[in-house]
Image (cartoon, grey):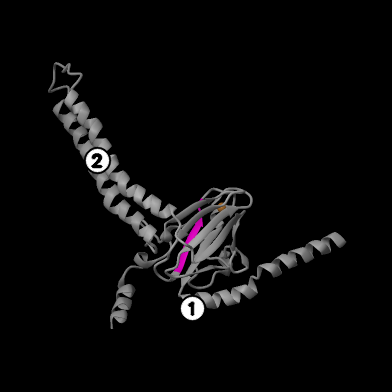
Amino acid sequence: MLKKFVHIILLILPSSLIANEPTDWQLGFQKSASKSMSDIVWFHDYMLLPIITAITAFVLFLLLYVCIRYRASRNKIASTTSHNTMIEVIWTLVPCLILIVMAVPSFKVLYSQDEIPKADVTIKAVGYQWYWGYEYPDENIIFDSYMIEDKDLMENQPRLLSVDNEVYVPVNKVVKVMITANDVLHAWALPSFGVKRDAVPGRINETWFKADRTGTFYGQCSELCGIKHAFMPITVNVVSEDEYNEWLEEAKVKFAKDEIKNNIKIVKNIREIK
Ligand SMILES: [Cu+2]
């Protein structure tokens, strides 16, 4: 009964509210699918936005007030006031206090993202000009992930976001992502998970996420990396543990690392013989 109810609600809701990708006329963030992202959304919606709105309104009020109250026609003789210790102390201390109040939850969110819990699944993402390569180091899996061209798109595949080989991860498990690049700077970013890390050649950056619902999630390279920067999307399928294991079995055959390495060796040998 409850399941049915939830399903009906989901059907009624505008797609932008449940989408895992950017939507037309979208305002604000994509819907979160991890605690990290929920923390970021909370911080933005309940800390930054109210404070910045209040400050902007207050400054606007002050400006309008002085423009009207102290206009030239009303003040024929200009005031010669130059200092007021009390007001100077206040306008130094109050902004400091506001910053301190904001810094506490900000650092909390930052540290929770920075500290990687014990990983259940580890993925290595390598940025290339212009596609992503993935490796599951513990599973002997390696594959490349290219964007699907417009003409090859199937139904329900969003343009510029769909890829041929998608990443699979289990739901409610800690996924550690090791990120690097092979040529220039790229960045592995997935808004719904609250994840964005630079991919730097010769260095491995780490981040993590724990997806709290299943679905297909889309991200893009977020560091200007050349002419096809906009065409190296990221697609992550969050699936149940069983579905993940099923995919693993298939992937271990399809994307077997040893075999791929052997094939590269064979190609190299053939070239050398030639
Ligand atoms: Cu890139």
Q: Earlier in the sequence, mark 2 or mark 1?
A: 2
Q: Residue at x 37, y 57 (%)?
A: 29
Q: Position of residue 22 (x, y in %)?
A: 42, 60
Regarding mark 1 in the picture, which secondary structure is present there? Answer: helix
Indicate whether 3 appears above or below 151: below
14 horizontally vs 220: left or right:
left
Question: What range is drawn magenta here?
Answer: 216-222
Disc 2 packing (10 Å; few <14; some 14–19; many ≥20) = few
Snapshot quadrant of residue 24: bottom left
Decide if residue 98 is in sight here: yes
Q: How many marks on residues?
A: 2
Q: Check disc 1 and report the residue beneath it.
A: 242
Q: Position of residue 164 (x, y in %)?
A: 58, 68
Q: Check disc 2 and report the residue beneath it.
A: 55
Q: CA distance from mark 2 to mark 1?
A: 51 Å
Disc 1 packing (10 Å; few <14; some 14–19; many ≥20) = few
Q: Position of residue 13 (x, y in %)?
A: 31, 70
Q: Disc 2 residue type?
A: Ile
203 horizontally vs 40: left or right:
right
In reply to whether residue 229 is colored magenta, the answer given is no
* Image quadrant where one finds the C terminus: bottom right
Snapshot quadrant of residue 61: top left
Q: Residue at x 34, y 48 (%)?
A: 106
Indicate which label's residue lies in the foreground, 2 or 1: 1
- Front-most of residues 21 and 90: 90
Regarding mark 2 in the picture, which secondary structure is present there? Answer: helix
Majority secondary structure of magenta residues: strand
Q: Disc 1 residue type?
A: Asp
